[in-house]
Image: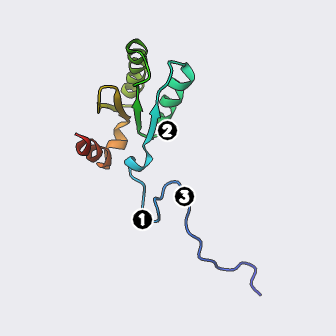
Amino acid sequence: MRFFSRKNKKRQSSEFNHGNGLMTSFDKMVYFVVESRKDEELLRLCDTIIASKPVLANFDKLTPDDCNYMLAFISGVIYACDGETIRLGERLFLFARKEEYEDGSLRQYVEDIK
């Protein structure tokens, strides 16, 4: 008698990408359109970086003063995480910790844009 049947179950994990192997840092990247200077939005963005997910942030909807305020705060988080900020446009920035740059997918993305 068999209690458990064998089934071919596909592995569904957040660490795997379409069954082709581990996800790259580019696959984990989160895109933010920052719409306000609210602390909740700023902390959500920073929590995403701390959670090992690169962030592509667009600050087009902010005033220059609000943008500078948020960039100063995020820069402190990046510094504490030993990360790097890359400016991709007038108000478009890529934020990530050092570990996310190690697989090369983010560097390749930056090279492809420029």
Assess whether mark 2 and mark 1 are in contact (beta carbons under 8 angstroms): no
In screen coordinates, is 86 left or right of 46?
Answer: left
Assess whether mark 3 and mark 1 are in contact (beta carbons under 8 angstroms): no
**Secondary structure of residue under mark 2:** loop
Whichever of callouts 1 and 3 sits on the residue coming sooner in the sequence is 3
Horizontal and vertical percent position of residue 16:
47, 59
Residue drawn at x 54%, y 19% is: 38
**Amino acid marked by disc 1:** Asn
Looking at the image, residue 36 lies above or below residue 93:
above
- Pointer 1 residue: 20
- Pointer 3 residue: 13
Residue drawn at x 31%, y 46% is: 102
Image quadrant where residue 56 sits: top left
Horizontal and vertical percent position of residue 92:
35, 30
Q: CA distance from mark 1 to mark 2?
A: 23 Å
Image quadrant where residue 30 sits: top left
* Between 91 and 68, the one nearer to me in the picture: 91
Q: CA distance from mark 1 to mark 3?
A: 12 Å
Residue drawn at x 36%, y 42% is: 99
Horizontal and vertical percent position of residue 39:
54, 19
In screen coordinates, is 91 left or right of 37?
Answer: left
Q: On the rendered image, what quadrant is the C terminus found in?
A: top left
**Amino acid marked by disc 2:** Ala
